[in-house]
Image (spheres, rainbow, N blue to C red):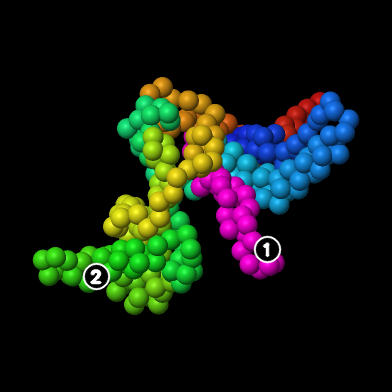
Amino acid sequence: SQPFPPIDQMHTVMVTELASNNPRATVLTRKRHLRGEAYARQFALNDELRRINLAKANRAVASETLFGGIGIVAVGLADRGGHDGEGGTQTYVSPIDFDDWVHDTSAPCWTDVEYEGHRYSVNRDDALKSDLYDAAKIRKAMTAEYAVNDEYGNQRVSSIMRDQDKDGGSDEFKKKLHFVDLFFPRDKKLCTFLASPSQDTEWIIVGEPIREVDWYGPPNGPYHKLIFKDVPANTMGKSMIGDIRSLHNAINALYRKYIRDAVSAKRVFACLRFEI
């Protein structure tokens, strides 16, 4: 048990201070005849910030940075869809779990990385029907990945793992496809690869890219990072929670000792007897 939680208090205070609400945009102009247009743009910006719930993404990134040293979000444009009969695209901000993140760790700083990206899952039927991906390349990569035997005729380990998973009653490999988006800053290209679903700790990219597009968005790419403490010659930041972990343990050890002493303490009242 933790009688006094300084880590939790630090996390609550910093996340609340950094991302308590959605940011607000203000559009100003000195020209009187443009004030109406400025107000309209300000209203549209604030409405978009509310729609994508930027505060929620910021809180997730701040929390990830406090514990892991770095927080990452992916930004971009997504198809609006046909649910409301409207076409076009809409902005999105999506926090990236560090377990799904990959980048060039050999680079001493972020400006020198050769690639960066993340892994995600998509429903197989939706991916094959989507215009974003090349369905023929997906099927070709799936054929190579889901082959039972390798080029030497031996049964693949991944096929054995899938058979074991099916015995457990899961249809994960049938319903989902695992993709990896990789951004190449030098070439300004965003490529999507099919990833092997049979590996949890290692990423195995299968075949050629199923999608390759030129990047015209923010100059630094679709991924934005938050780092509170830089580490020299290293792209990873330093965890602030890790700095107070020892203090957290020391304070709670003292509190537990004081509580045990208070519980076990006994009072003995002396009674003096005088005889005359």
Q: Residue placed at 14% from the left, 65% from the top?
A: 151
In this rendering, position of residue 103 left or right of residue 28: left
In this rendering, position of residue 264 left or right of residue 71: right
Per the image, the residue denoted by label 2 is 147
The relative height of residue 50 versus residue 249 in the rendered view (above or below) is below
Q: Residues within 10 Å of mark 2 (few under 14, many from 20)?
A: few
What segment is highlighted magenta in the picture? 68-96
Query: Would you say residue 222 sits in the magenta stretch?
Result: no
Q: How many numbered tags mark residues here?
A: 2
Mark 1 against mark 2, which lies toward the viewer? 1
For the C terminus, the quadrant is: top right
Q: Position of residue 168 (x, y in %)?
A: 37, 75
Q: Residue placed at 48% from the left, 63% from the top?
A: 131
Per the image, the residue denoted by label 1 is 86
The relative height of residue 229 versus residue 129 in the rendered view (above or below) is above
Based on the displayed image, in which of its 4 quarters is residue 244 positioned? top right
For the N terminus, the quadrant is: top right
Q: Residues within 10 Å of mark 1 (few under 14, many from 20)?
A: few
Q: Nearer the viewer, residue 55 or 134?
A: 134
Based on the displayed image, in which of its 4 quarters is residue 86 positioned? bottom right
Q: Amino acid at mark 1?
A: Glu
Asked whether residue 8 appears in the rendered view, the answer is no
Query: Which element type, helix, strand or loop, lies under badge 2?
Result: loop
Q: Position of residue 17 (x, y in %)?
A: 70, 34
Spatial CA span between label 1 and label 2: 41 Å
Residue ranking furthest to the top: 232
